[in-house]
Amino acid sequence: MAGLSVSELARRSGLSKATVSQLESGKGNPSVETLWALGDALSVPFARLVDEGVEPVTLIRGADVPLIRSTDSSYLAGLLSASPHNARRDVYFVRADPGTPKVSSPHPRGTVEHIILVSGAALVGPASSPRAMSPGDYIRYPGDAPHVFEAQNAGTAAVLISEIR
């Protein structure tokens, strides 16, 4: 684990030692939030933890996007394209319904998120001042500060691009 003890990784990620130990031994089923926390603690982008590799030409049908559900909101995200080793961006498809907003902790320093709203309506951006978005709207904001995605309509969908500068 990058030369870290279970205790140190737990401390850096904000997870319990028991959770880290379970995952290290191949037991358990981590949530999106757990994977994000571990990735941030290890300075490994989330996409690298879940990417299965990329073919030279990739077509992913919208109905076939494997979505991972958040444990604390109605937010689902599916990785469309992980950043290759020589680049620093990941592309996701996001779907959410009204309810508990998806509040994200800061990602590694220099992370910038870009969102294009495809359908529905949402409040998106810095947790302290999210902006109202309609289909076709684009927003860019610091991903290395707390941020939020809050669907205002059922079936809200967006494309999210996360880059590290």
Image (cartoon, rainbow, N blue to C red):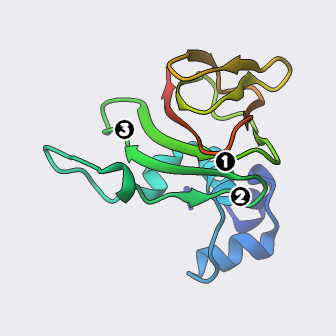
Q: Is disc 2 in contact with disc 1, using a CB cutoff of under 8 Å?
A: yes
Mark 1 Cα-neighbour bin, 10 Å: few <14, some 14–19, many ≥20? some
Q: Nearer the viewer, mark 3 or mark 1?
A: 3
Q: Please, which residue is most extreme toward the right here? A: 128
Q: Which residue is mark 1?
A: 41
Q: Element under label 1?
A: helix
Quadrant the N terminus occupies: bottom right
Of pointers 3 and 2, the one earlier in the residue sequence: 2
Checking the image for residue 9, the label placed there is: 2
Q: Element under label 2?
A: helix
Q: Is 52 positioned to the left or the right of 3 in the image?
A: left
- Where does residue 8 sit, x and y in percent of width and height? 75, 58
Q: Above or below — where is 55 with respect to 137?
A: below
Q: Nearer the viewer, mark 3 or mark 2?
A: 3
Distance from Cα at disc 3 to Cα at disc 1:
19 Å
Three-letter residue code for mark 3: Ser
Kindly tell me whether residue 100 is visible in this rendering. yes
Q: Which residue is mark 3?
A: 83
Three-letter residue code for mark 1: Ala
Q: Is 56 positioned to the left or the right of 64 in the image?
A: left
Quarter location, residue 153: top right
Three-letter residue code for mark 2: Leu
Checking the image for residue 75, the label placed there is: none
Of pointers 3 and 1, the one earlier in the residue sequence: 1
Quarter location, residue 105: top right
Question: For the point 55% across and 16% down, which residue is it?
Answer: 137
